[in-house]
Image (cartoon, rainbow, N blue to C red):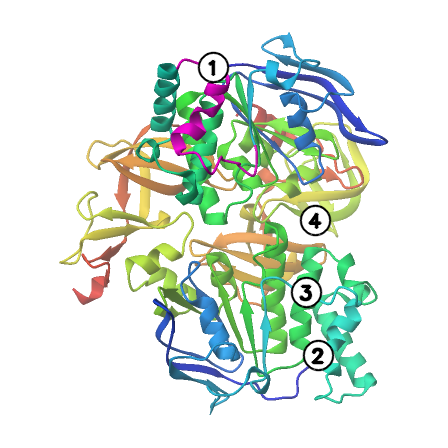
């Protein structure tokens, strides 16, 4: 069990800054997800925590100990890679027990620990099978078993589900999270898949271009994105942006978009002017004939419980998640109503979210 | 943009066996002029074999294939006038986007002059929104652009029908969502006859005029997305559509208003389940964990040893360990064989 602290961690490869001034704390026993597109620096960060890369500057603290310069083997951290490599000529028992045999543990102890691990992963009935004949899921479980059998201080996982198909990924997501609930070891998990991150994390750190964009509870990051990047990276479909030119000031409770006033959570900062954007999640858009914000239905995607309706407006396309009973046909002219309590306002030039009453609500839970 | 009449596709009692494996069994399906039909099923269900039989890449053991009312079962692929779009885009890497699109039009069989080729390529590029990429090499495109070009190569030919084999599955989630909308828009504009196969229920629900659910080589049910979702013919079909998947629970575990006789299993989609604080008379389930999706939460419950998943508003105050009452509202019912029991037929 361990707390992991990164302090102003940076990594430079030649002239390329892969990770820039990263500061964050992974609480003891938490499932911490680092989320970002490929090339955002998340794998480099993980490799530095593991000791597979040395930081260019900054510190890594493991339970308060500075391990920045310590080699990987001395950190007591288990790394689970995307492409799990098992020893094909060994059976499940020998694969899981391998790290313990390398530590020269007595045979009886190895046996006990392997069996306990297999029970935890619910693969104890497979212990004497060869790994070659196992299903993809069972192979993944064996690979996990090999990581957890050492009972390390922390687990680092680099997109361990990346190679699996969608349906199976969802299943493994649930299993991994349940496993975490049972053993409670600090886990840093990196992925580019926001659904996976939302589903599993206690805490999410979103990275972009080597830097931290935002860190927080999954729901907080979703409801209260600090930047247009985060707002766009999370959600299926992602947040809609209605771009407009104008100005907002402290205390404002509405914005003027092409002459029509749209209510917003009260602005709690000095304000901004120029290129602005109103951010609205698809589930906070509804159809309203009386609204002056209008557009034409461009696409309707039926999803069973709900439907996604894409509406072309003079401010760009807006996607609405509506009950599938709501009448919407391609070509219809419709009015849009936005849930004003849930809107975000961005400075469209910098992408920064402006502070509003919405953020106070989120901070209070 | 097209001047040619469209064609319908028809399969009549088609079977195809590979050694011991019956890939397709007694499959009959028709796709009307201008219709978008999606065959939905898991890997190995016989979807691709069905497409290959229509394209003439496989010969059926039994049954016939009709295109535009004519039997084509014995005809070679080239005479069938159907375009096949594969999962892995196969472009000529050394050619530009323009030349990739023009390629099918320059075949000696067509004898189109360059002016007509240019006109068609530009029309299709506009439709696919890749006009500004016409001069780029195929290798300099993103995955989404390459797949658009691959679809464009099928479109320029103006074939009688399009066969598409999971064309979006190698793309990332965002791009897939965009191209789903685009493909449907293009189909509505061009009015093509499309048979599309996928294992992705979202693609099936959002694009299809009708869905055919295929299992072990057999067509289990054909209908509009809404028909299949709301009136599945059996428990298997019910489980193919819907996120989170339908909960199949033994009849009697939860109180129901009017279960038809013979009901063995209750199918409860998220809209059929009401969660409330334990109220003392409805059965009590325990919240195991809450999966956050942002717009909604998936609540994982356990009721008398049975795992259930349902949606809840993220602002509904639920936590792991909470005990809640569950109530059913107009669920689906299935008999012991899995066949759906229609409540009105009681």
Q: Chain of mark 2?
A: B
Q: Mark 3 — residue?
A: B148
Image position, residue A309 (x, y; %):
56, 58
In 3D space, how far apart are the residues under numbered discs 4 and 2 (Cα atoms)? 41 Å
Q: Is residue B98 visible?
A: yes
The residue that mark 1 highlights is: A104
| Chain letter of the residue beneath label 3 in the structure image | B
Cα distance in 3D space between marks 1 and 4: 63 Å
Start-end of magenta stretch: A81-106
Q: Residue at x 17, y 46 (%)?
A: B252
Residue that sits furthest to the top in the current view: A65
Q: CA distance from mark 3 to mark 4?
A: 27 Å
Measured as percent of width and height from the top left, residue B172 is found at 61, 51
| Badge 2 element | helix
Nearest to the observer: residue A214 or residue A245: A214
For image coordinates 56% across by 53% down, the residue present is A320
| Mark 2 lies on residue | B104
The mark lying in front, picked from 4 and 2, is: 2
Residue pointed to by mark 4: A242
Q: In which quarter of the view is residue B325 placed? A: top left
**In front: mark 2 or mark 3?**
2
- How far across and how far down the image is residue B73, in percent? 46, 86
Circles 2 and 3 on the same subunit: yes
Residue B259: quarter of image: bottom left
Label 3 CA crowd tier, 10 Å (few <14, some 14–19, many 20+): many
* Proximity of marks 3 and 4: CB atoms separated by less than 8 Å: no
Q: Secondary structure at mark 1?
A: loop
């Amino acid at each position: 069990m361990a707390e992991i602290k990164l302090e102003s961690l940076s990594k430079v490869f030649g002239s390329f800054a892969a990770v820039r001034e990263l500061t964050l704390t992974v609480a003891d026993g938490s499932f911490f997800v680092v989320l970002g597109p490929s090339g955002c620096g998340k794998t480099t960060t993980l490799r530095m925590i593991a000791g597979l890369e040395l930081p260019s500057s900054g510190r890594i603290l493991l339970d308060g100990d500075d391990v920045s310069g310590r080699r990987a083997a001395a950190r007591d951290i288990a790394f689970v890679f995307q492409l799990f490599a098992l020893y094909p000529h060994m059976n499940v028992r020998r694969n899981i027990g391998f790290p313990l045999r390398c530590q020269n543990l007595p045979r009886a102890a190895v046996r006990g620990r392997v069996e306990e691990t297999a029970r935890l992963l619910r693969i104890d009935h497979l212990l004497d099978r060869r790994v070659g004949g196992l299903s993809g899921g069972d192979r993944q479980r064996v690979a996990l078993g090999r990581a957890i059998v050492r009972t390390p201080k922390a687990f680092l996982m680099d997109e361990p589900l990346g190679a699996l198909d969608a349906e199976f990924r969802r299943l493994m997501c649930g299993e991994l999270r349940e496993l975490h609930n049972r053993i409670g070891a600090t886990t840093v998990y990196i992925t580019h898949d926001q659904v996976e991150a939302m589903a599993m994390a206690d805490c999410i750190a979103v990275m972009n271009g080597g830097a931290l964009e935002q860190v927080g509870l999954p729901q907080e990051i979703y409801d209260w994105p600090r930047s247009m990047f985060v707002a766009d990276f999370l959600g299926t479909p992602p947040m809609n942006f209605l771009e407009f030119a104008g100005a907002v000031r402290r205390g404002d409770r509405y914005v003027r978009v092409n002459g029509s006033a749209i209510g917003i959570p009260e602005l709690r900062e000095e304000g901004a002017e120029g290129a602005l954007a109103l951010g609205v999640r698809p589930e906070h858009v509804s159809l309203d004939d009386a609204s002056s914000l209008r557009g034409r239905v461009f696409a309707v995607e039926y999803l069973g419980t709900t439907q996604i309706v894409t509406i072309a407006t003079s401010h760009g396309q807006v996607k609405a998640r509506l009950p599938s009973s709501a009448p919407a046909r391609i070509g219809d002219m419709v009015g849009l109503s936005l849930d004003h309590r849930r809107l975000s306002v961005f400075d469209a030039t910098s992408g920064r979210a402006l502070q509003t009453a919405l953020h106070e609500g989120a901070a209070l839970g | 943009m097209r001047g040619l009449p469209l064609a319908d596709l028809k399969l009549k009692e088609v079977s195809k066996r590979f050694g011991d494996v019956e890939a397709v069994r007694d499959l009959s399906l028709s796709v009307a002029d201008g219709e978008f039909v999606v065959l939905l099923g898991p890997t190995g269900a016989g979807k691709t074999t069905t497409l290959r039989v229509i394209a003439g890449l496989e010969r059926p053991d039994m049954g016939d294939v009709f295109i535009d009312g004519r039997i084509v079962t014995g005809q070679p692929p080239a005479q069938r006038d159907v375009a096949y779009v594969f999962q892995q885009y196969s472009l000529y890497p050394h050619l530009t986007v323009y030349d990739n699109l023009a390629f099918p039009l320059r075949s000696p069989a067509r004898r189109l002059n360059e002016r007509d080729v240019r006109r068609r390529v530009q029309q299709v590029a506009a439709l696919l929104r890749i006009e500004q990429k016409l001069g780029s090499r195929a290798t300099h495109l993103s995955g989404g652009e390459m797949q658009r070009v691959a679809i464009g190569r099928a479109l320029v030919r103006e074939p009688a029908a399009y066969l598409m084999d999971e064309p979006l599955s190698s793309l990332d989630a965002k791009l897939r969502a965009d191209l789903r909308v685009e493909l449907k828009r293009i189909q509505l504009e061009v009015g093509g006859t499309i048979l599309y196969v996928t294992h992705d229920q979202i693609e099936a629900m959002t694009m299809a005029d009708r869905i055919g659910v295929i299992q072990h080589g057999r067509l289990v049910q054909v209908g509009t997305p809404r028909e299949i979702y709301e009136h599945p013919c059996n428990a298997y079909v019910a489980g193919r559509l819907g996120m989170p998947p339908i909960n199949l629970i033994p009849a009697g575990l939860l109180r129901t208003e009017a279960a038809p006789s013979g009901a063995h299993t209750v199918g409860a989609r998220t809209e059929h389940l009401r969660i409330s604080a334990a109220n003392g008379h409805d059965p009590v389930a325990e919240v195991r964990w809450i999966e956050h999706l942002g717009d909604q939460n998936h609540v994982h419950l356990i009721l008398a040893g049975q795992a259930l998943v349902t949606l809840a508003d993220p602002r509904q105050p639920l936590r792991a360990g909470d005990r809640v009452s569950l109530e059913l509202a107009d669920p689906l019912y299935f008999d012991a064989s899995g066949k759906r029991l229609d409540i009105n037929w009681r």
